[in-house]
Image: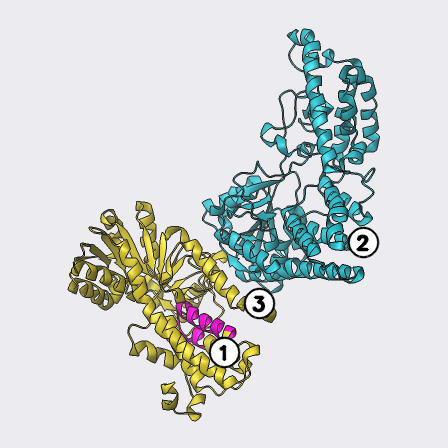
Chain colours: A cyan, B yellow
Amino acid sequence: MPSSDSPTAEPSPAEAPAQGKGNAAKQPKGKEAAAPAEGSKLSGAELKKQAKAEKAARRAQALLEKGASAPAAAPTPGQQPKVDGQKGPKGQRQHQRGSSTSVEVKNLPVRGAQKTVPVPVAVEPKKEDKTVEFFRHLYKTRTTSIAGASKDVHPAVLALGLQMSNYTICGSCARLVATLQAFKRVIESYTTPPQNSLSRHLTSHVLSPQIEYLSSCRPLSISMGNAIRWLKLEVSKVDVSVPDAEAKKGLCDAIDVFIRERVTFADQVIARSAADKIKDGDVIMTYAKSSIVQRALVKAHEEGKKFRVIIVDSRPLHEGKHLAAALVRIGMDVKYCLINGLSHNIQDVTKVLLGAHAMMSNGRLFSRIGTALVAMEANEADKPVIVLCETIKFTERVALDSIVHNEIAPADELVIPGGPLEQWGDIKKLQLCNPMYDVTPADYIQMIITESGNVPPTSVPVLHRLGNESQG
Amino acid sequence: MASLGNVPQNEKAKSFDIVETYHRLLNEDPDLTMPVAAIEALIELLVQSRAVTVYETLDLVKTQSDYLKSRIPNSISLSAGTDLFQRYMISSLKPSSTGNFETVRQHLLSNGRLFVSRAKAGRERIAAYGRHFVRDGSVVLTHGGSRVVGALLGKAAEASKSGGNVRFQVIYVMNDARSSESKAVVSALRSKGVPVATISEGAVGYAMGKVNLVIVGAEGVVENGGIISRLGTYQIALLAKAAGKPFYVAAESHKFVRLYPLGQYDLGIDQEVIEFKTDEEENLSPEEKKFTEQTPEIEEKKGYFDTEIALPKPNTAVDAVDFTPPALVSALITESGVLTPSAVSEELISVVRATGFLKLFVLLS
């Protein structure tokens, strides 16, 4: 990426006279590598910077409107007049952006080399805003390099942050476990400074920067939020009189127990009860890829049950391919289709198993985008929808739609290389939106299989409360 | 513990047949429900058992419960009772309290009896709660031989007799296969001065327009708040929903069962309700019969009718049950109050948590 980035950044000094003050704030945004340098220091500073950038952008836009009013009035439609209205280097810059997009497109399937979604107001102030209005509050720049990360961030966390931002570690539970393991390393290498106590110093001065850095790489998942809250509570409970080494060991042990109870063991219990629900002759439909659904299917297969699996998948991630490959490898009968084949395939299905990113307190399921569609179709065809979810993913928050809480992935992932949308950035009034999750109404869900038993969606708040009680 | 002395000791303990006891208890007392009969049978088992340790007792009760369940065609309602009793035992037989096993056992027995008597009294409380649902001038539709519903309607009728102004009518859905039971219910109501109309099962949709509310009993209340009840309940619930009439279920909370069916064919019991036949089948030679049996079924559905436990005889249409999903149930009238279907799961979760059953289950599994 840096190779394509550096030319992008180069023209910016040339714009300086036109943009004035805005340029200084804008520069790191355009230059991906520089973004983390400032972004990960402090959230306050970051926020300030963002506000500054936005202000600058607004000013620039106003300037543009004033300055370019004459050429804009020239009635040539399309984007040509806009470029004309801009200064030379600006036009050149746009062109380069386009080419950098196509470089990125080649790496799409891995999702690895993805670039942060540029805040378009800042990057292309004279172009139209390419963010979708409803989701505008969700667009965030992502840290994709360790350059300039705060010195407080532990190397293990630095590595983890990168792995998360390029989706090497993906999936709610995998990220949760990896985070806790990294935090264990942080705690192990921690020594309480003199005149301080562990319970007061660790959270605010050591853990907070790590958490901030991680969330700048990719927004924290609900389960990570729950676990971090638990960890902070554990830290605060450490007795001041306990020696450092002992307290650290206690915390690390507690983390191990937490992972074992809430994830490892929970997964086993869920896989077993889900496998119990699979009967001979069943046709199981699942959407995309959930590790827990995979475990349940494999377990049922190992128990010798005869059933078929239909995997529904969708662009742009095609996560279902990995699931299909894994299941075929162990000799299961698998059918793979894209989401446009859903309504045809739903007829043969007897049960739908879905994974979860989070379960909301109003019983709604927050999961990979497209899940709601599958659940709705299954409900329409009167097929039971079963969600497999650890209680650590339960949250007290409620969700009424997929807009308020969500994560926006780079829109370029939606573009097929060589397809008509390749230059979508240049097409006027075209916006692409690529949210990661959607919300499935509770009415479509028959059962949630958790490690504390099978419950209807209405019991999510009860289990969440009980789970926290036993924790606290 | 008066009965303890009456029971012939030791020799008979080996020949104690829980299934027989269960049937005897049910026959002796027509007011007894299946879960309570199961609990009473288990108490008798404990009385006669010679187990001297906690684990021996737990194991004995568990194996006998499973045996009883496997011997009864429709074990759902029954398993509510045995599960409840086992949970109760686990909670009261904590290893810490095993200083003197004999006292623990006596405690268990006396509390078990208390439980049975409370369960019987529960019906009265349900009737007391439920009669307020029957308003003046309302028409109640019901079916089946539920004792709770009978008590509830009886209580409502008494209220009108003793100076109250509740006058209501009942539409009773007759069941041809169980006409004697149906007639008994109808005559019991009529003798209390309640006007009763009897209709066939086919006339439910026709009659629904005149109905103000539906009250039925249940054999079991499952985890998601749905009910398992006499065949025909589901269609009444569907019709009531379509007509926008409230559908109430009167059931004691000992009928709450840890079962989570996903649909009609997921009840874990074998029912011979749908049987495909042709006229010529009787005239076929053995080879031909064999061939017809080999006719491929739809592969996906085959598993629905399989079951893990070998049952003595599958449920026929007469005593078959169906599953009414929670979405069709307006409210459940129990002795601990009127609950929404979603509250059932909450209740079950808290019961399980309270007794630490889950932890034990987790440790064992």
Q: CA distance from mark 2 to mark 3?
A: 37 Å
Which is more foreground, mark 1 or mark 2? Answer: 2
Q: Callout 1, which amino acid?
A: Thr
Q: Is residue A11 above or below residue A376?
A: above
Query: What residue does disc 1 label?
Result: B63
Q: CA distance from mark 1 to mark 2?
A: 57 Å
Q: Which residues are magenta?
A: B67-91
Q: Callout 3, which amino acid?
A: Lys
Q: Which mark is residue A192?
A: 2
Chain letter for mark 1, please.
Answer: B
Residue nearest the viewer, comparing B348 with A6: B348
Chain letter for mark 2, please.
Answer: A
- To the question of a shared chain for discs 1 and 2, the answer is no
Residue A181 seen from this side? no
- To the question of a shared chain for discs 2 and 3, the answer is no
Q: Residue at x 53, y 38 (%)?
A: A401
Disc 2 is placed on an element classified as loop
Q: Callout 2, which amino acid?
A: Thr
Q: Is residue B50 above or below residue B247?
A: below
Which is more foreground, mark 2 or mark 3? Answer: 2
Residue B74 inside the magenta-drawn segment: yes
Disc 3 is placed on an element classified as helix
x and y, in percent, of residue B101 in the image: 52, 84
Q: Which mark is residue B359?
A: 3
Q: Residue at x 43, y 86 (%)?
A: B48
